[in-house]
Amino acid sequence: MFTASDVLPYADRLISLRHALHREPELGLDLPRSQAKVLEALAGLPLEITTGRDLTSVTAVLRGGRPGPAVLLRGDMDALPVPEESGVAYASTIPGVMHACGHDIHTSAVVGAAHLLASRRAELAGDVVFMFQPGEEGQRGAKVMIDEGVLDAAGSRVIAAYAIHVASTVLPLGVVATRPGTILAASDSVTVTVHGKGGHGSSPHLAVDPVPALCEMVTALQTMVTRTVDAFDPAVLTVGSIHAGSAFNVIPASGTFQATVRTFSPGTHRTIQAAVRRVVRGIADAHGVRVEIDYQANYPVTVNDPAEAAFALATVQRLVGPQRAVQAPQPVAGAEDFSFVLEQVPGAYLMIGAVPPGTDPATAPMNHAPQAIFDDRSVPEAALVLATLAAARLAAASPDPSSPDSSSPASSSWDSSAAPGSAAPGTPE
Ligand SMILES: [Zn+2]
Ligand SMILES: [Zn+2]
């Protein structure tokens, strides 16, 4: 339905919106200024708009001119508590807060997709739900929006959902990557607190020392991973913090450690949650200490539906050419709350390179770094990809064979110097 030239009339406005969002980044679930900017940018379009109850989300529904199902496009809006050092002219004016993960681009791209799709509304064979979500960076904003009904906003459950994430490293500008199955890890956090009985360092038999128990737990957890987890379905468990005691000759009453756990399949995710509890409790029993385990499963594995990932890749390849739309060779150990959407409906999560030309993608500062720079040209590119995915998916679901589709190859105006062989997913969260 779309070609690269279709987005050009919108590019300047979308990039201006991106700069405005970038200058005024906000954190978490409460993003009133970002929400206002999105509402202003959507004003005048034929959309049914609702805003969130427990978060400053925006849900917009575009009704196609022809009957059909609904599909969903997601854009996250939140920033990070990172002091910006990018040096760009539109840098953050909020101290200590930066759009270091490029969500300003995602928001602007979904606005662009809304404009593009609205311009072809009569041809659309169904509805499009635009999901503008706060709180991706750890606050489960997507889950809150699902609970508030975003997947059914068009009146029926969406049949497919898509999101795209920019990468400030690895992927050259404009190169899109996705893969079937797991694309991002599950992310858990564990806090273990061991309670013993404090005493004199000279008389451990009169105390209950939590320190040896803590130490055994840390090493036993590493052994547990190697003995429990399939080498071809891996897990990472890192104890990043351990604290006990205050003096060399005092046995402390308690101690604690914290770990992050990353897994790539729902099966290993379940296995390791149970194994962490079993190992920690067993060692606590052996030492006669009491233990508290706070295991937080933060975000589940992000799993692309194989058919949707294949459809998305083929559709984007027709749009930008096979050299600039590639299958990612492996998942990334970052995590995403779009995983909650993909647990409910089929869909695909894609990544797009935003490395500025002249910067080596291999060494460019990564997402979340204070120096990360995301090229403006990724905004219209991502808008075009999202609009094309929505239109093509509705066309594919249409029983009407005369329904417009996106099968006509289109050339792109973007940098074509990308090296396809080097393409691999970037690193979101
Ligand atoms: Zn992100
Ligand atoms: Zn992030």
Image (cartoon, helix red, strand yellow):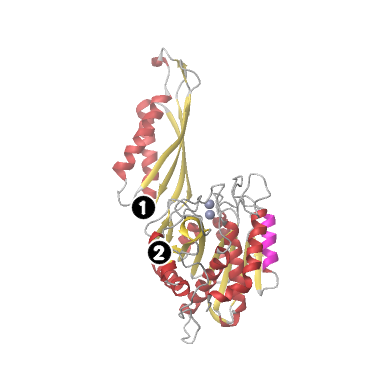
Q: Residue 267 carries which label?
A: 1
* Dot placed on the residue nearer the N-terminal end, 2 or 1: 1
Above or below residue 207? Residue 365 is below
Badge 1 amino acid:
Gly
How many numbered circles are shown? Answer: 2
Q: Out of 293 and 191, give the one closest to the viewer.
A: 191
Disc 2: which residue: 420
Q: Residue at x 52, y 79 (%)?
A: 1
Above or below residue 279? Residue 253 is above
Crowd tier of the residue under label 2, counting other residues whose Cα lies within 10 Å: few below 14, some 14–19, many 20 or above: some
- Disc 2 + disc 1, Cβ < 8 Å: no
Marks 2, 1: nearer the viewer: 2
**Residue 308 visible within the image:** no
Q: What is the magenta range?
A: 31-41
Above or below residue 279? Residue 405 is below
Query: In what element is the residue under mark 2?
Result: helix
Query: In what element is the residue under mark 1?
Result: helix
Helix, strand or loop: magenta stretch: helix
User: Distance between the Cα atoms at labels 2 and 1?
Assistant: 33 Å
